[in-house]
Structures are given as structure tokens and as C-alpha cells.
Amino acid sequence: MAEASGTRKLLELKKERVSDKLDHSSVISGEQRWVDPGQELRYSAETQDEAYQAGAYDVIESLDFSARIAVQAGYVIHQRAQSVLDIGCGTGELLKYLNPNIRYVGMDISPTAIAIATQRYSNYPHAEFFASDFRRWDSPDDEYDCIVWAGIGRTWTRGGRKGDKRDWLNILLSLNRYLARDGVIIIEATKDHWPKLSKLIAADYAVLAGNDIDCLVNDHRAVRSTRVIQPRNMQT
Ligand SMILES: C[S@@+](CC[C@H](N)C(=O)[O-])C[C@H]1O[C@@H](n2cnc3c(N)ncnc32)[C@H](O)[C@@H]1O
């Protein structure tokens, strides 16, 4: 009897949680209706730092979005990766889910995000962070067991909002040089971007695993597609 009422309460709580999407967004935005504090700022590489300062990426550290980061970390752990390169790592949220002794290199164009990450993970002995534009960056290590590139969107095209999505493939191909033998790349985009990304990479990469998850936030970023991929020319 007590168990049944406990289950009922849990179900009620879950219902509230889902129907409360707008209220939850208000926690992030300070508005009743979802108003992203910096949506436009997220669309170009030049304004990423401002985007962090405006709080446009705060959602990444929310309870809702913890699920998507946990998914990325799950793949890293399954691969028994000893080393991870995180492209566009933001505040290094992924590292929170990994073994503190892992070799982790995070890079991001936003000095604000990198300053937070550097401070937050200062006690991780093998973690390093770099503030740089990926297109002008050289990695300190030659190769990694896993490369993570999550949050692929317009920002990553040279033209920003109206940019050419084929730029995504160029970035991906340039990551191959850092991939250890049998290493994998974990990519993630919002579900609406995935069909285009999927077509772009089909000839060069095999998809080994993946999933789509809905983080239930009332925002276009809520449903995320994550895939584990490998360059076809590396497959034996
Ligand atoms: C949507 S956020 C994703 C952050 C984190 N990877 C995640 O999945 O939660 C995109 C990130 O890419 C970074 N970024 C965008 N263009 C970049 C570039 N050219 N070089 C390095 N980082 C870049 C942004 O500053 C931002 O932190």
C-alpha cells in the first residue's frame, strides 16, 4: 500500500516535471516564455565569449542537460579511453563525468569558458584547457583514444547563422589526424541538424553506435543526436 502511494507520488512528480517545461525555462531565462538570453550570440564564432557571459550556455550545466553529457561520457567509458580530446569543450562539463585521472585536453574559443574550466578542474592532474579557435589550433598530444565534438551547430560554420554546413565535414576530417588507432569520434548535434550532418559524413565515416535523447527542456536544443563514428579508412 505504502509502495503504491509512493509510486503514485513519483508518477505525479514526473507529470509535473514534464508539464512544467515552461516554468523550468523561466528559471533559466527569467521570463515566463522561453527567451534565450543570447541566441543570436551563439550563432557565430566571434561572439561565443559574449554568449557565455550573457548566460546563453547556462543550460549546458542544468539537470536536464546532464543526460546528454552522461551519454557522451558513457561512450568514452565504454571505449576504456585513456585520453580524450574535447573540441569546443565549453566549461569542461564532460570532464565532471570522467575519471579524474584521465588524460583530457579541452579546447574552446571562449576565454571565459576556458577560465571557468581551468579553475574548476585544477585538481585533475592530467587535464589541460586551451582558449583558441579550433581552425588555428594545434593539439599538445599527437593522438587520443576518443575525440568528442558535441554541440555542433551553426556556430561551427565559417558563415555563422547563414553558413555552409559542409564546414562541419571539414572540421571532422581535420580531427582524424588526432585519432589513435581504433579510436572513435563522438559527435553530437541537435536532432534537427542531424539529417544534414549524417548525409555529409556518410561517405567518410561509419556510425558504430548512437542515440537520440529528449532533455525535455522547452527549447529547440532539447532533443540531441549523439553518434559514435570512425573514419572508414581506419577500419580494418
Ligand atoms: C553548443 S556549445 C557546446 C559545448 C559543449 N561541447 C557541450 O556539448 O555541452 C559549442 C561550443 O563550441 C565553441 N566553439 C564554437 N566555435 C569554435 C571554434 N571555432 N573553435 C573552438 N571552439 C568553438 C563555443 O565557444 C561553445 O563552447
Image: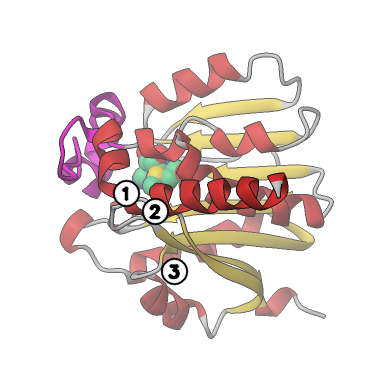
Label 2: which secondary element: helix
Residue of label 3: 169
Decide which of tag 3 and tag 2 comes sooner along the chain: 2
Residue type at mark 1? Lys
- Give me the disc on residue 93: none
Taking the image as drawn, is residue 31 in sight? yes
Relative depth, front residue between 31 and 145: 31
Residue matched to label 1: 21
Return the x and y of residue 224 as percentages of the image width and height: 45, 61
Residue 230 image-quadrant placement = bottom right
Q: Secondary structure at mark 1?
A: helix
Q: Which residues are magenta?
A: 29-56
Residue 44 lies in the magenta-colored region: yes
Q: Secondary structure at mark 3?
A: helix
- Quadrant in the picture for residue 38: top left
Residue occupying the point 39% across, 48% down: 16
Residue situated in front as seen by the camera: 7 or 235: 7
Q: Give the quarter the ligand 1 occupies.
A: top left
CA–CA distance in space, label 1 to label 3? 34 Å
Residue under numbered circle 2? 18
Q: Residue at x 80, y 57 (%)?
A: 79
Residue nearest the viewer, comparing 129 with 191: 191
From the viewer's side, name the closer residue of 218 and 45.
218
Q: Are marks 3 and 2 in contact (CB under 8 Å)?
A: no
Closest to the camera, between mark 3 and mark 2, is 2
Q: Relative to residue 81, is residue 70 drawn left or right?
A: left
* Other residues around mark 1 within 10 Å, as few (<14) / some (14–19) / many (≥20): some
Residue 22 x %, y %: 25, 46
- Residue at 23% x, 27% y is 54
Relative to 135, is 182 on the left or the right?
right
